[in-house]
Image (cartoon, rainbow, N blue to C red):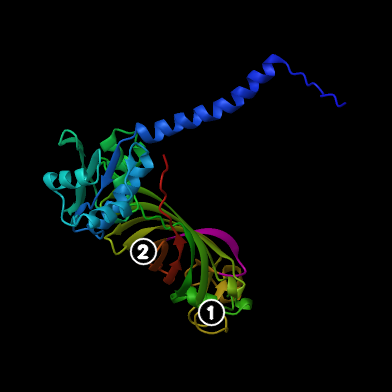
Amino acid sequence: MKTKKKTWSLPWEKTLKKLFLVIPAVLYLMAGTSNGQTQKTVAVLNIDTKDLSLDPASMGSLVRLELEKTKVFSVMDKYDIEYITKQKGIDINNCYGKTCLLEIAKSLDLDKILTGNAERFGDKIIINLRLIDIASSSIEKSDVTEYQNMPDEIQIMVEISVKKLLGLDIDPNLVNLLVNYEDPIISTKTNLKLNGPRMGIAYITGEMAERLEAPKNKGGFDSYPFLSQLGYQYEIQYLSAGNFQALVEFLFVLSGLEQQLFNPNIVFMNGFRIGKSGWEIAFGPSLSLRKTATGFYDKSNMLGGGENEWYREFEWNGDLGENPYEIEDNMDSRGDIVLGSGWIWAVGRTFRSGYLNIPVNVYVSPDKEGWYVGLSIGFNVSRRRRIQN
């Protein structure tokens, strides 16, 4: 005869098991109620556009996307709208008025419908959104916002307009970027930063070219008057208005590395960028380290080395009497390193390809001993930074 084995359990264990079964079901029902029953259903049809690159259907899709992100309403899918209206023979392509929209909303069994228009007007883009309540047949909310004429940032504009319409919090940085007109704005249109490497070539004229080409035993550098240049530019914007930008530029350059020369230069320039095409003019002082010596040019070949030959001051032959030539400082590879100064004028243009900026500049640095004439090319990649809420 078999005997059943009796199991024992404490009273609180049974209660705990029931709770594990009941709690998930209650949570599921609560989630379903909050997500489905309390949310109103809204649809977004075409948003009328004028003088913008987006057509009404694309603008409607953009508004629908930003509305879905807010999770305030249950937004009807565009494919469901297309299917139902096609089955009922309703044309939504040119439906922007209140009467037409109410008829479509009732056919789709909607609680609300969102409509509006967007257009470019002068130097502004204006977005007008209206939320229509179907039960009362009235406009429940509306918002009209004027933005800077920056078509590339249309999605951020739509995000701001949708949140303003629904009374949601908006990051003030987004508003400063696109909405405020009174304050100078730092934006992708007015704030073009060209920090980055620079490379180019310089041609040297006059006495400086002669000193470069002279042999080293005569104080020259035994090099060519063409010098490669490699450097980096950093800039700070201090004024921005529309298509005008004023900035301070700092440029560090090394010249002549390919000829075993080490000629560092620091340039400080005040620059102005004008127009959408990226034209720029700049000017300012430069500081450089160079080897110089005090000497004279033997213009009459009194020392027998040739006319206009350069000599250091102590190389004068005292047997010839007092030195009749002008004593001056000049570039000399045998001399001491000193700090020199100059002035630079530059003009250039920035070419763009997507996020790639390619600044090209031509510059001159006049000097009584000779001129620097150069060409500089750089590059940088600037990405629009979108601020997330």
For residue 272, above or below residue 40: below
| Viewer-nearest residue: 235 or 344 | 235
Q: Position of residue 376 (x, y in %)?
A: 44, 69
348 sits left or right of 293 in the view: left
320 sits left or right of 177 in the view: right
Examine the residues drawn in magenta and state their main secondary structure: strand
SS label for mark 1:
loop
Disc on the earlier residue, 1 or 2: 1
Q: Position of residue 211 (x, y in %)?
A: 53, 75
Looking at the image, the residue that sits furthest to the top is 11
242 sits left or right of 17 in the view: left
- The label number, if any, that marks residue 383 in the structure image: none
Magenta stretch containing residue 238, yes or no? no
The residue at 32%/43% (across/down) is 75
| Viewer-nearest residue: 107 or 183 | 107
SS label for mark 2:
strand
The magenta segment is 332-342
Residue at mark 2: 345
| Viewer-nearest residue: 168 or 149 | 168
Q: Position of residue 26 (x, y in %)?
A: 50, 27
| Callout 2 amino acid | Trp
Magenta stretch containing residue 340, yes or no? yes
Q: The N terminus is located in which quarter?
A: top right
| Callout 1 amino acid | Tyr
For residue 6, above or below residue 173: above
Q: The C terminus is located in which quarter?
A: top left
For residue 10, above or below residue 248: above
Residue at mark 1: 224
The residue at 57%/74% (across/down) is 311
146 sits left or right of 207 in the view: left
Q: Residues within 10 Å of mark 1 (few under 14, many from 20)?
A: some
The residue at 72%/16% (across/down) is 10
